[in-house]
């Protein structure tokens, strides 16, 4: 088969020719390739390899130039290899996130129970969600003549797949140009950094395909926005009955229902996570609490960060006369054990 005609060196040179041509639109010469790759080959060696690639039909020489451009066969080879590479990266990331997420969520449930037992207060722990994470890469590929698949991977190792409808088929060269356009403009940016200037420049450069750019940007916003359906594990609500000042049946039932229905907890936690400075331990005493039913309580929270941009909250709710030192010690220990979990090697 054709793929076996190319050894590693030829493959590297072909990829370099295609990338260079896609970036510049100009035929590529051997001197450019000698600067472009880290193969440390002479121009003469590269010329020989390029002659072989031309003979095999992967590149062609336009009449008016000494340089070469990719043929359809060259593009096909590049796309197939690129997709294998990217699909492997995406699969590895998906597996990595699945493995860690399952473990983390079981851990968090236990954390809530352990904290409640240890402190004799009510506790809440949120599952990790993604904040201020950055675009790692974007990969567009054809599904069929009417649909393309956008795979977006962010630095929080969140993978989002989105099917985008297209009015006409996208050829390989256009697809590669769109991939390069999106990645060169968006990689490394957080959602907040993708401004109107960037968006209009992208759309202008995409020309008739600006709708695809809009769909990708919408998907980015969905992927990187705050998760409104934040999962919260709670424990120890019956501990409220241990404190006379909270034992009043109306107060206690309001507090317990706040914990059970979780909506107010979720909005409080979401706001807390969005405040970049709230990365240490926060204490809300009595009326400082943003939740009405907790105005007779103290709420102590800590933000943990599993990896860049992947954050959650641990909170302890008790009477205003709670043992603050013990609560803070517990939170510090937990925060330290959770911080950086996604960055630690597996095994």
Image (cartoon, rainbow, N blue to C red):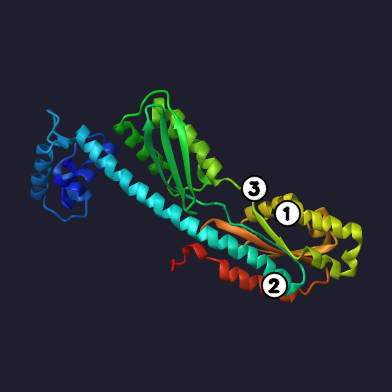
Q: In what element is the residue under mark 2? A: helix
- For label 1, the SS is helix
Residue positioned 18% across, 55% down in the render = 39
Locate residue 139: give its quadrant: top left
Kindly indicate whether the residue at mark 1 contacts the one at mark 2 (C-beta within 8 angstroms).
no
- Dot 3: within a 10 Å radius of its alpha carbon, few (fewer than 14), some, or many (20 or more) residues? few
Quadrant containing the C terminus in the rendered view: bottom left
Q: Secondary structure at mark 3?
A: loop
Query: With 15 as the anchor, is 293 left or right in this view?
Result: right
In the picture, the disc for residue 328 is 2
- Which residue lies most toward the top here? 167
Frontmost residue, 309 versus 231: 231
Marks 1 and 3 close (CB-CB < 8 Å): no
Q: Residue shown at 12%/38% (left/top)?
A: 54
Instruction: Find the distance from the CA under tag 2 to the CA under tag 1.
Output: 20 Å
Tag 1 residue? 265
For marks 2 and 3 on the same chain, the one whose residue lies earlier in the sequence: 3
Visible residue check, residue 303:
no
Query: Which is nearer the N-term, disc 2 or disc 1?
Result: 1
Q: How far from the left and from the top, in percent, is residue 76?
A: 25, 37
Labels in figure, total:
3
Nearer-the-camera pick, 81 or 312: 81
Is residue 276 depicted above or below 247 in this figure? above
Residue pictured at 41% horizontal, 27% vertical: 146
Task: From the image, tell me which residue sits under label 3.
Answer: 229
Res. 190 in view: yes
Query: Crowdedness of circle 1 by 10 Å Cα count: few (<14), some, many (20+)?
Result: some
The quadrant in which the N terminus is found is top left
Residue 288 at x, y percent in the picture: 80, 59
Tell me the distance, in whole angstroms, between the alpha carbons under discs 1 and 3: 11 Å
């Amino acid at each position: 088969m054709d793929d076996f005609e190319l050894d590693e060196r030829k493959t590297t040179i072909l990829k370099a020719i295609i990338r260079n041509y896609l970036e510049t639109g100009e035929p590529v010469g051997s001197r450019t390739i000698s600067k472009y790759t880290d193969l440390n080959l002479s121009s003469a060696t590269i010329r020989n390899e390029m002659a072989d690639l031309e003979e095999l039909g992967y590149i062609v020489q336009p009449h008016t130039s000494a340089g070469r451009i990719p043929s359809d066969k060259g593009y096909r080879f590049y796309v197939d290899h690129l997709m294998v590479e990217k699909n492997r990266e995406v699969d590895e990331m998906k597996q990595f996130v699945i493995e860690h997420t399952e473990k983390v969520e079981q851990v968090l449930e236990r954390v809530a129970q352990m904290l409640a037992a240890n402190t004799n207060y009510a506790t809440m722990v949120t599952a990790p969600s993604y904040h201020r994470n950055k675009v790692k890469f974007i990969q567009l590929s054809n599904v069929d003549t009417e649909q393309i698949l956008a795979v977006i991977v962010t630095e929080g190792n969140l993978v989002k797949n989105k099917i985008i409808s297209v009015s006409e088929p996208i050829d390989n060269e256009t697809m590669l140009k769109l991939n390069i356009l999106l990645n060169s403009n968006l990689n490394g940016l957080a959602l907040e950094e993708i401004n109107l200037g960037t968006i209009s420049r992208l759309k202008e450069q995409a020309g008739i395909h600006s709708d695809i750019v809009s769909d990708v940007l919408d998907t980015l916003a969905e992927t990187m926005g705050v998760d409104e359906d934040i999962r919260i594990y709670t424990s120890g609500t019956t501990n409220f009955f241990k404190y006379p000042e909270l034992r009043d049946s109306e107060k206690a039932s309001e507090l317990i229902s706040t914990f059970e229905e979780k909506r107010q907890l979720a909005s409080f936690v979401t706001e807390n996570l969005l405040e970049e400075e709230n990365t240490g331990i926060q204490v809300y005493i009595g009326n400082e609490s943003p939740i009405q039913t907790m105005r007779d309580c103290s709420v102590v929270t800590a933000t943990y960060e599993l990896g860049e941009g992947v954050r959650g909250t641990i909170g302890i709710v008790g009477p205003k006369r709670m043992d603050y030192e013990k609560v803070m010690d517990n939170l510090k220990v937990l925060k330290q054990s959770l911080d950086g979990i996604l960055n630690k090697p597996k095994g």
